[in-house]
Every structure is written in C-alpha cells, then in structure tokens.
Image (cartoon, rainbow, N blue to C red):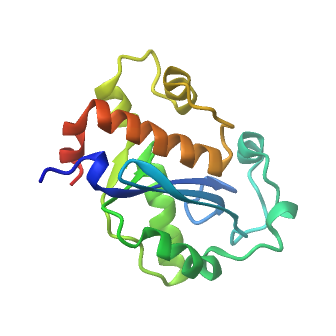
Amino acid sequence: MSPTVENTRFVAIDFETADPKRDSACAVGIVVVDKGEIVARDYRLIRPPRKKFNPYCVRVHGIHWEDVCDEPSFGDLWPELEPLFEGADFLVAHNASFDKSVLHTCCRESGWLAPEQPFLCTVQLSRKTWCLESNKLPSVCDHLGISLKHHHAASDAEACALIAVNGLRENPGFLGKVL
C-alpha cells in the first residue's frame, strides 16, 4: 500500500531559538498526527545554554531569559518529549532544514540520539501543491483558513501539521519524495 496521510503517522515540530546558534532552543511545539487527525499536542519552554538572547530573536518570538530561566534544559526535557516521536513515519516542519538542525544539534549537544525519521518540508509541499505568491507560514495559513499566532511554537507546529494534512491530501505523490 502506498503511503498517504490517511495511513501514516507524523510529528510536526517548530522551534524558537534564543540566538542564531542551533543549540539555543527556547521553545518547542509538537503536534502528532495519526491517519490525518491530530492526536497529541505539546508545548514547552526550554532553558537554552546561554543567558544572552539575541534582540532580533526576542522581537520575533517575544521570549526572554526571564521566561525560561527556571525551565528545564533541552537535555533534561528530551526524555519527556521523545515518546511523542515513537511510531512516526516522518517529521514535518515549515522550513524543515532549520527545525531539523535545531533538533539534531540540541540532541547531540545534550548527549541524546536525534529521531531518525525523514523530514517533510511544508514550504516545499506548499510550492508543489498551491500557486501562492508566498509560501511563508502566514501566507499558506491564510490560503487554507488556518488560524495562526505566528512565532509561537505551539501555533506554528499545529499550523504546519494542518498544512501537511491538507497538502498531502491534495498532492499525495509528494509523500513519495519523503518516504
């Protein structure tokens, strides 16, 4: 049987970072989709390894050191998050190269193994599925009527999950490029 959104399980993930370095995750949103339906959500603030937050990053997501200083580090948090990835056929992110590099760097720097599933990029899926002027997350969400609080990791991850479900239903052949 060919893989479709109706017979696969995937995890959408979105990170916010404290600075341009990929080990500086300060928030993560995770949405688990099974057979085209959202079955789990998680959102966590993360204490990054450095107290200094890049002002540009703060302007983007609004998270400051004071918001995360008492939160667990990625390494301490990962054992709680890792089970969400079990059984997933693939992972999904909007601009997947960024979120994949944050996930892999944070896992490596914390001494954990990163998930091995392939990543599907919803920017690429959007480009191949809809003729939009822009494939940025807010534009794709507007096109699909998806509510978005942009640069909040939980909202971005859920939007990404819904883009993947809609896009893979309209363009099921795209999944063959991932699996």
Residue 68: image quadrant is bottom right
Q: Where is 160 relative to 114, above or below?
A: above
Identity of the residue drawn at 40% across and 41% down? 164
Question: Where does residue 39 sit, x and y in percent of width and height?
Answer: 50, 58
Q: Residue furthest right?
A: 66
Question: Can see residue 122?
Answer: no
Q: Quadrant of residue 56?
A: top right
Q: Quadrant of the C terminus?
A: bottom left
Residue 28 can be seen, yes or no = yes
Q: Residue furthest left?
A: 1
Where residue 153 sits in the image (x, y, percent)?
63, 50
Residue appearing at x 42%, y 73% in the figure: 114
Q: Nearer the viewer, residue 121 or 175?
A: 175
Up/down of 65 relative to 76, above or below: above
Q: Quadrant of the N terminus?
A: bottom left
Q: Is residue 165 left or right of residue 71?
A: left
Compared with 107, 16 (above or below) is above
Viewer-nearest residue: 107 or 166: 166
Residue 54 lies left or right of residue 142; in this view the side is right
Residue 130: quarter of image: top left
x then y, percent, for residue 89: 30, 61
Give residue 99's position: percent from left, percent from top: 49, 54
Q: Tell which of 46 and 86 is nearer to you.
A: 86
Q: How many marks are shown on the rendered structure?
A: 0
Please report the residue visible at 45 percent of the width from the left and 15 percent of the height from the top: 133
